Image (cartoon, rainbow, N blue to C red):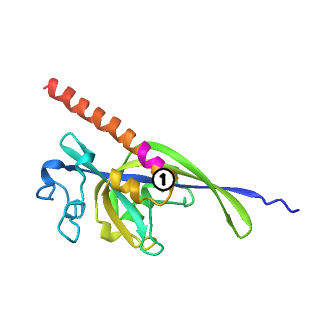
Amino acid sequence: MERQRTMRAYSAGGVVFRLVPTTSLASNRVEGQPEQLQPRLKEEGKETQEASQATGDIAIEVALVGRSHPGIWALPKGTPQPGETIEQVAIREVQEETGLQVRLIAYIGSISYFFVRNHVRYQKQVRHYLMEAVGGDTALHDQEYDRVEWFPIAEASRRLTYQNEVSILSQAEEVLQRWLQSQRKGKEKDGEGK
């Protein structure tokens, strides 16, 4: 019996978020954000935001990439090019696959899985980062996926095809909440010093 060899493979990606003021949910327009980052309405004209995702006066949405056929939704990710750091891979791949300009906030965690290609077994590790959308346009995504859409976290969690990515999204929400708290504390501290 021939033993199958295992190769290691790495990739990186992220959870891209945007903050949507809940006061704007009624008008569905976010002041100060580029048009392409504005919340979208469903075809029936109903809002896509879920009040349960509201944190104070903001709601959190995340961008998912998808393929209409076979009907999958995933977090954006991809493989390194020569000379790239893992953080550079994550930023580049997320920007290519979503069309959004992002800034890296924090490391979330990694997932590992096995797959076989050409009779070679691979152990793949994907490192995920929390990223904030700061510009760009989802219409400018590359052709690897045919859909890029914004979802409230709970909805994104239901739509993700792979359970290990649901776990990453849950971890991302915890990291994001801590980051938002530190941002608020920083603003309060700045306000005291003035």
Indicate the position of residue 19 as horizontal and vertical percent values. 25, 49
The answer to whether residue 48 is above or below residue 127 is below
Tell me the kind of residue under disc 1: Glu
In this view, the residue in front, 116 or 154, is 154
63 drawn magenta? no
Indicate the position of residue 79 as horizontal and vertical percent values. 54, 60
Residue name at image x 74 percent, y 68 percent: 119
The residue stretch that appears in magenta: 167-171
To which quarter of the image does residue 189 belong? top left
Asked if residue 26 lies left or right of residue 55, the reply is left
Asked if residue 24 lies left or right of residue 20, the reply is left
To which quarter of the image does residue 40 belong? bottom left
In this view, the residue in front, 173 or 154, is 154
In this view, the residue in front, 50 or 29, is 50
In this view, the residue in front, 143 or 150, is 150
To which quarter of the image does residue 105 belong? top left
Residue underneath mark 1: 165
Residue name at image x 35 percent, y 66 percent: 148
Asked if residue 117 lies left or right of residue 145, the reply is right
Secondary structure beneath label 1: helix
Indicate the position of residue 68 as horizontal and vertical percent values. 42, 74
Residue name at image x 86 percent, y 62 percent: 2
What is the magenta segment's predominant secondary structure?
helix
